[in-house]
Amino acid sequence: EPEVTQTPSHQVTQMGQEVILRCVPISNHLYFYWYRQILGQKVEFLVSFYNNEISEKSEIFDDQFSVERPDGSNFTLKIRSTKLEDSAMYFCASKQGQSSYNEQFFGPGTRLTVL
Amino acid sequence: GNSVTQMEGPVTLSEEAFLTINCTYTATGYPSLFWYVQYPGEGLQLLLKATKADDKGSNKGFEATYRKETTSFHLEKGSVQVSDSAVYFCALSLSTGANSKLTFGKGITLSVRP
């Protein structure tokens, strides 16, 4: 069964460093998402991506964040200069169709720890 | 704004016990409602969904009914198993297309004892 994959499973970085979190969505999906969950808090929407551009982004997704689909299979989230408060689990998701009740398929997440 | 509120956890039950996990929502419009489950070490998986008032979603013995009058989508199972131990997230989505982001509740951890 097709699945969304994410690498790495755990990333440790120093404050101020750049990190790139990688995702491989399901191959025939068209809509892509990043969410994050700070420990003990809600899963929060960061950004959605369709047709090679950002469709919607949350207030969290400031200038330090960017997304890219560089090669038609990977979908990446870059944090340019990490802060301590960026420590969280980051989930990638993808969806095939445009309806709100089409299922979003999630990856297992990348745990980012900023020291 | 839109939000989802789940009951506080964690929840610990014995095998074969009855499960209810409460979920209420606030939304501007008529959302689709979802329950996602996360097993240890895995991503979030869709458990069930309902797209309009009075719809009942069901899967793997779990059920939830979309109650517009009480803005609720409580998750129930008549007899839980050890394998149901996981984190359960209630969520809603309002828009279509690429803007159909999910708004999640905080999640609740369920542990089922043999």
Image: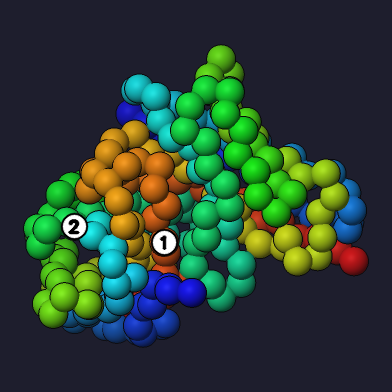
The residue drawn where x is 66% and y is 56% is: B109
Q: How busy is the neighbourhood of tag 2: few (under 14 within 10 Å), some, or many (20 plus)?
A: many
Above or below — where is B84 with respect to B20? below
Side of A6 where A73 appears, left or right: left
Q: Position of residue A75 (x, y in %)?
A: 22, 72
Chain that bears disc 2: A
- Provide the residue designation for mark 2: A49
Above or below — where is A23 with respect to B28? below
* SS category of the residue bearing label 2: strand
Instruction: Give amino acid for label 2.
Output: Phe
Above or below — where is B51 with respect to B54? below
Quarter-of-image position of residue B67: top right
The residue drawn where x is 83% and y is 44% is: B78
Chain that bears disc 1: A
Q: How busy is the neighbourhood of tag 1: few (under 14 within 10 Å), some, or many (20 plus)?
A: many
Side of B105 where A111 appears, left or right: left
Q: Position of residue A114 (x, y in %)?
A: 32, 76
Is residue A61 shown to the viewer in this render?
no
Q: CA distance from mark 1 to mark 2?
A: 14 Å
Disc sitting over residue A105 in the figure: 1
Instruction: Give amino acid for label 1.
Output: Phe
Q: Position of residue A96 (x, y in %)?
A: 31, 57
* SS category of the residue bearing label 1: strand
Q: Position of residue A4 (x, y in %)?
A: 39, 72
